[in-house]
Amino acid sequence: MVVTALRRPAEVSQLWEYADTARVLDLRRRVRFAMEQPPLSWTCPSRIDDRHMSRLLPVRKARAIALKLSLMPVELWEGQLFAGSMTLEHPHVHYEGGFPDYATEQEHARALALRLSIRSVLGHIVPDYPRVLRKGLRGIMADAETQRARAESDEERAFLDSVEIALQAVIDHAERLAGHCDDEAATCEDMERAAELRQMAANLREVPAGPVQTFWQALQSVWLLHMIFHSTMNGNAVGRLDQYAWPYLEADLDAGRLDRAKAAELIACFCLKFNERAKTTDDQLPESREEQEPDLFLGTEKGLGSRHASTSSQAGTMRDHVDATNHWLQNIVVGGLTPSGEDGTNPLTYLLLEAYRRNQMTNPLLTLRLHRDSPDELVRYACEVLKDGGGMPALFNDEQLIPAIECMGIPLEDARDYTNDGCWETIIPGRTDFGFQRLSTMLCLEYALNRGRSRQSGQLRGLDLGDPRNFASYDRVWQAFLAQLDHMIGQHVRHVADTVNNRSLIAPVPLLSALIDGAIESRRDMTAGGAKYRTHGLLAESAAHTIDSLLAIKKVIFEDKTATMAELCDALDAHFQGYGSLRARLLAAPKYGNDDPYADQVGREVIDAFTSVALKHTQEHADIVKCGCGVATFSWYIGIGEGLGASPDGRLAGEPVSSNFSPALGRDKNGIPGAILSYAAMHDFNLPIGGPLDLRLNRNLVCGEKGTDRMAALVRTFVETGGGMMTLTVVDAEELRAAQREPDKYKWLRVRMGGWCAYFTMLSRQQQEHQIRRQEGQA
Amino acid sequence: MTEGTTERDIEGLIFDVDTFAVHDGPGIRMSVYFKGCPLVCRWCHSPESQSAKPQLILARHRCVACGTCVQVCPQGVHHFDDGRHVVERDRCIVCGQCAQACVPGALAIKGHTITAGEIIDQARRLKPFFDSSGGGITLTGGEVALQASFAEAILRGCQAMGIHTAIETCGASRWDRLEKLVRHTDLVLYDLKLIDDDAHRCQTGSSNRRILDNAARLVDRNVQARVPLIPHITDTEENLRGIFAFMGRVGLSSVALLPYNTSAGAKYEWLDRPYELEGEQQTDEQLETFLVMAREEGLDAVVD
């Protein structure tokens, strides 16, 4: 499978020695132009037809999918090689939004009581695209048909009906697209384009209904389903595209059906499709936005979708959501080990990296899996791509993650096939129903030091374990922290176990279930437990600040004894007003991220406490959901900080926290290698879901060939020392400042956010300032 | 050494450690900056490296004029004069209390003692980065030879672990001291600034006699001469030709040219000292000319 001959640098480099075609250059320009145009909305029917209302819920959901697909426009982007769009070019209509209601009054009411709605579709799943390419949707329908004889209840039969209706709706939509291609071909004066359009029509009549024969069909098939998921409220990821699509490309190359230049053009067109929906309109510019007070009661009053009560400190404003306008979990994962344990790098791995580099856009997101035997030229090449900006690809370490995933109870072959859920959380593609929750370890410490109350909102949310001023030892503080952690995690895990099938009561996913291993076989929707695996990520939030806060208490209060617990509590109550000198001492205490064995020891204790408390609570539910731990803020680090009071590490009330598992902003004073070593020290195959170390590199550190060498060595050492995930953003603070001053000139400057990539000028002022501070921290 | 102490216990005074240094030798390098230098080069971009004692610095752009330093200083060093932070350095005893209390990090003490063992331990932890990049440790400064026993202990300890060692030296020390270090050094980065002795005295405060003598003694070592290109001072054709010819004569074959760093003066403000030089970075064409000149002398020349 692996073409080892192609691993030699000279031959690998030939892969990208091709010029962009006129088509690609033109499309790139037009996709960018379209992003800047105000989008028009599309009116989706509000309900499915009454005649379907007598059927069971999954059938009605499938009818809603079919209804939307039967009406969605089928116009092409001029010159595109792939059909199916979420956004039209002329007129600039976006129709991802809107979905027909399919539920009864009673179902709505019951869902509301469970804090759910028809919109409670999580996305974050990777469909079984290899199966689609291999069997086609008709093959999957045949599997469903086979199960019909075994169906034992109306529910099971309704599920199988829903699968067939949804799959047929996709086939019908492909036929409408094919018809449109034919129509365009009939009136097209350019003979070459007319032939292309007829080939596109032929492709759409063969796939995704039937098995894929060519690389072009493979990409069309994947794109069409991806587009349909995202247009029917189900934001799913792409998975290991280079692994499952390479055999078709290889066959085409061998048979002479495609040359490399044409393959590269197909890939570029495919990647551009993911950007058609992007919006970089002026209303997103920071100066067009109104300042908003953060809503500190998010999660308790309004609720975060299906989540019961907030375990996160995230305060709500529109700001962070507008910042995330162009994030849709469109992640492609390349490289890494195959299920049988060989290196999976192939030419498509490089071609996808190259397409990302050339498009210079934020989508699709790209993640590169690495292991000890990943080819050197792949590592170097990834560094070259990273040097061009945008913080992609994110780097995943197989050496750490595969054994960690195995520890969750996933067999080795499946663990080796891991991918991400669209952001960075690990998931086994095509086999997994996945959910996650952020659990703020920092709130646990805040509760411990504030009698169970949130400092920002004043609400009693944790346990009142007595006056922290009387905590006479570090161990007493630690025990209080542990008790809060135990309380928070215990409550959450019970909630997960109690509600694990609830989404099936209002928001089943018939189309996705058809593409998830185990669902058809068990005749159950994915949301009702049909998937082969059901995993849940327990993600520690604000971990670096928790570690640093405990360190500061340990060092300043109980070792140096230069302040008392009472003084610390007073200082926190006073937001450090009048406690500058104490704050300076707290800031000077050892911090996570500095390769300081003293600090890393406490860090490890915090992570071990989190994972062992999680294990204690999740063990008894292991048969219904496999839980794994991680560390996360995603891109919400500003809102998360707004919900936290002053913390013992010297952080002021409301200040942003560090992203994911990065050291606290400006507190990693021992360089990038120091941060990598500390991060690695937190790992012992205990964080299977992940938790990236998000690093910033100034351009001068990595310029030229030598800079690439140095960066590649850094990445190699990251893999060697065993951290789980790392992202590297190469940009200069001065460049970001210039972009603030002259946004028009820097319209396409990209920066990495918590789990994705954004156009810098489209970010809120607070987010921009935060990005600059992070960059300056590395200067 | 007194009884019971080892080489690891030898203390030295440094002012910084960089674990991802770019210009101090091959690969990813841990650079250790020694404090104290026998020269006072007018273009020195680390003025805090020159004194062999700890010093208080003030990064004015970080100061928020909170006045905490005024309160905590036992010597009355700090006061604010019409909003301007004044540091009366002659009263400062470098106790560090102001720096410790300075939340925005504007005040800091440059120079702290550390043992050779501590540095060796850090290098040991960083070894995976050295191994993957062909990097290692570089002792720089300031001048390493002013703390020769300390430097020797570090170099010896690192070499014993298989870590590539480099020193960067101005060469202006006694040969026996330098020789002690070179014995445990895989790469010597050797500064050559001005070939004319009068000019050298004028611009660095010292004669170049010993520097040139020591350079000649290093021929059988792995040496890279480094020439900082200071506009109109060291980057004249006459000076560069003189340096290249000298190198050819004594048998040194490798030279790196260091283009002028226009932000070289940035740290003078920390110490309330003036920076007197002005100038632009050399153009690519100029650098190319210099490289050609060096190659004409048969030297292996690069721009770093």
Image (cartoon, coloured by chain):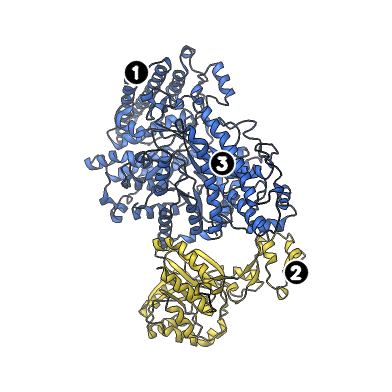
Chain colours: A blue, B yellow
- Mark 1: which amino acid? Arg
| Residue at horizontal 70 percent and vertical 51 percent from the top | A565
Residue A639 appears anywhere in the view: no
Of tags 3 and 2, the one toward the viewer is: 2
Q: Earlier in the sequence, mark 1 or mark 3?
A: 1
What crowding class fits label 2: few (fewer than 14 Cα within 10 Å), some (14-19), or many (20 or more)?
some
> Can you give x and y, in whole percent of width and height, for residue A79 in the image?
37, 37
Q: Is residue A416 above or below residue A773?
A: above
Label 1 residue SS: loop
- Could you tell me which chain the residue with mark 2 belongs to? B
- Residue to which mark 3 is pinned: A323
Between A14 and A233, the one lying in front of the other is A233
- Residue to which mark 1 is pinned: A150
- Could you tell me which chain the residue with mark 3 belongs to? A
> Can you give x and y, in whole percent of width and height, for residue A46 in the image?
52, 20
Between A745 and A206, the one lying in front of the other is A206
The Cα atoms of the two marked residues, 1 and 2, are separated by 87 Å
What crowding class fits label 1: few (fewer than 14 Cα within 10 Å), some (14-19), or many (20 or more)?
few
- Residue to which mark 2 is pinned: B74
- Could you tell me which chain the residue with mark 1 belongs to? A
